[in-house]
Image (spheres, rainbow, N blue to C red):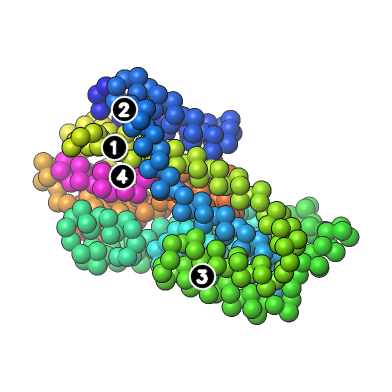
């Protein structure tokens, strides 16, 4: 079976997954397992892989998603414990006093928290900071969680241009330059992007306000407050630990600090946090079992999605070695296919073409494959048309970064939608055109400054 056919089959697999999810035909975990498995069987029949190699690919895929799955399980448990203990009730009251009935203020605050939270360049840690803090406020204000996610992912995409962030480091490695050197070229675009994030945040605030969001908006009158019955109110009061608020705040800050400083794998701080929080807030095995069981459903659902994504990542992204020869991965074949069908007359405008296509391609390529697989190929094509490597890298880093956290190929995206209790199809539907437009505006700004050729 030729690599061209493998590349075509790869794109068909991605298309089948996206269409199935958008039409709500099945759960993401099922789609992530079924379609890549069908692809694997076809590749085995075609002689490209054998079943033993497919097994190795899937096993390799789990190495990409299992840390995020562990992070999700323990972060859900941790924030669940903090919610039960009433820590977020106090924080929400403080935030509500700060923003009042200002829907736009809530949207802008989301952007600020996402920008600050993503200074470490970690998508998973940023979602763990932004979503638990802002989701209760969005619910109280009758604002859509999808709006929160869109504003957050745009802010995170802009901050992802930092030299210590993954995409910039990967692109710098391919270029053979220091990450800080590449970042110095990107700084004006990043400043423009940050300003644009706040503009988008205001627009989303206006959109939410127009649909009646707010403490005293039309949606409040229609939907009203969520009123707990006597049994629910009693249980909530029994679980609340107001006297431990300061302890819980200090513990949460410590967990997030460990997450940001990256001393341990990302799930370890939450493991420590869960153990300490449940021992202090809810001593006794019976109560601890009750608390964990109450949060088991969301954790299991999202964990199954991430395990399904392991099959997707393994079969599409990973590669195997036969003897001394590495068999090209499906995603590599997809990358080569794009370079092969790119019309020659577009060669001189390669950075522009890449910039325009980066957001759609982000749905099909994970970060490693995009920068380590496609970028060298695009640089090689550009050389044939006299296009320098730097503008190509800038186009790929800037425009692709905007779409990083709407891609189902990025495990942190699955974590974010899981924490926000949003279907990934709704997240992509709500964010895709905004992210694409955002990336194109950043690209136009780069062209105006002469960083990218037209």
| Residue of label 3 | 256
Q: Position of residue 347 (x, y in %)?
A: 18, 39
357 vs 115, left or right, is: left
The reply to whether discs 4 and 1 touch (Cβ–Cβ < 8 Å) is: no
The residue depicted at 76 percent of the width and 70 percent of the height is 240
Q: CA distance from mark 1 to mark 2?
A: 9 Å
Prevailing SS of the magenta stretch? helix
Q: Position of residue 144 (x, y in %)?
A: 63, 53
Q: Position of residue 407 (x, y in %)?
A: 44, 46
Q: Is residue 412 magenta?
A: no
Provide the secondary structure element on which disc 3 rests.
Answer: helix
Provide the secondary structure element on which disc 2 rests.
Answer: loop
Q: CA distance from mark 4 to mark 1?
A: 15 Å
The mark that comes first in sequence, 3 or 1, is 3
Q: CA distance from mark 4 to mark 3?
A: 29 Å
The residue lying toward the viewer, choosing from 82 and 178, is: 82
| Residue of label 4 | 369
> What is the number of the mark on residue 208?
none
Q: Nearer the viewer, mark 2 or mark 3?
A: 2
The residue depicted at 61 percent of the width and 70 percent of the height is 276
The residue depicted at 55 percent of the width and 50 percent of the height is 417
Provide the secondary structure element on which disc 4 rests.
Answer: helix
The residue depicted at 43 percent of the width and 31 percent of the height is 36
How dense is the environment of label 1, judged by Cα within 10 Å: few (below 14), some, or many (20 and up)? some
| Residue of label 1 | 320
The reply to whether discs 1 and 2 touch (Cβ–Cβ < 8 Å) is: yes
């Amino acid at each position: 079976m030729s690599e061209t056919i493998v590349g075509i089959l790869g794109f068909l697999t991605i298309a089948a997954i996206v269409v199935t999810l958008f039409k709500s035909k099945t759960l993401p975990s099922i789609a992530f397992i079924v379609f890549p498995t069908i692809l694997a069987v076809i590749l085995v029949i075609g002689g490209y892989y054998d079943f033993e190699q497919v097994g190795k690919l899937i096993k390799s895929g789990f190495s990409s998603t299992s840390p995020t799955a562990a992070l999700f399980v323990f972060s859900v448990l941790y924030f669940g414990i903090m919610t039960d203990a009433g820590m977020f009730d106090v924080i929400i009251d403080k935030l509500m006093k700060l923003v009042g009935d200002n829907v736009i203020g809530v949207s802008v605050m989301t952007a600020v928290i996402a920008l600050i939270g993503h200074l470490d360049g970690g998508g998973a840690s940023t979602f763990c900071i932004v979503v638990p803090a802002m989701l209760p406020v969005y619910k109280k204000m009758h604002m859509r969680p999808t709006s929160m996610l869109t504003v957050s992912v745009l802010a995170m995409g802009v901050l992802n241009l930092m030299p210590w962030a993954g995409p910039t480091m990967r692109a710098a490695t391919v270029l053979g330059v220091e990450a800080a050197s590449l970042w110095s070229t990107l700084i004006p675009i990043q400043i423009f992007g940050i300003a644009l994030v706040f503009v988008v945040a205001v627009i989303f605030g206006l959109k939410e306000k127009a649909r009646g969001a707010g403490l005293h908006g039309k949606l409040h009158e229609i939907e009203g407050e969520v009123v707990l019955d006597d049994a629910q109110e009693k249980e909530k009061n029994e679980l609340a630990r107001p006297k431990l608020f300061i302890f819980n705040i200090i513990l949460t800050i410590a967990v997030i600090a460990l997450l940001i400083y990256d001393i341990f794998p990302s799930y370890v701080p939450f493991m420590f946090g869960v153990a300490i929080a449940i021992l202090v807030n809810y001593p006794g095995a019976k109560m601890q079992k009750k608390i964990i069981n109450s949060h088991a459903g969301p954790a299991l659902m999202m964990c199954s999605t991430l395990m399904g994504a392991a099959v997707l990542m393994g079969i599409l992204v990973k590669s195997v070695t036969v003897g001394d020869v590495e068999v090209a991965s499906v995603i590599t074949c997809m990358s080569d296919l794009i370079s092969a069908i790119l019309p020659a007359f577009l060669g001189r405008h390669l950075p522009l073409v890449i910039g325009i296509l980066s957001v759609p391609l982000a749905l099909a390529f994970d970060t490693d494959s995009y920068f380590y697989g496609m970028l060298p190929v695009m640089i090689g094509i550009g050389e044939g048309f006299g296009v320098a490597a730097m503008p190509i890298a800038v186009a790929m880093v800037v425009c692709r970064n905007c779409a990083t956290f709407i891609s189902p190929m990025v495990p942190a995206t699955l974590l974010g939608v899981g924490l926000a209790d949003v279907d990934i199809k709704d997240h992509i539907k709500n964010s895709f055109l905004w992210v694409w437009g955002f990336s194109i505006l950043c690209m136009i700004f780069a062209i105006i400054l002469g960083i990218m050729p037209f």
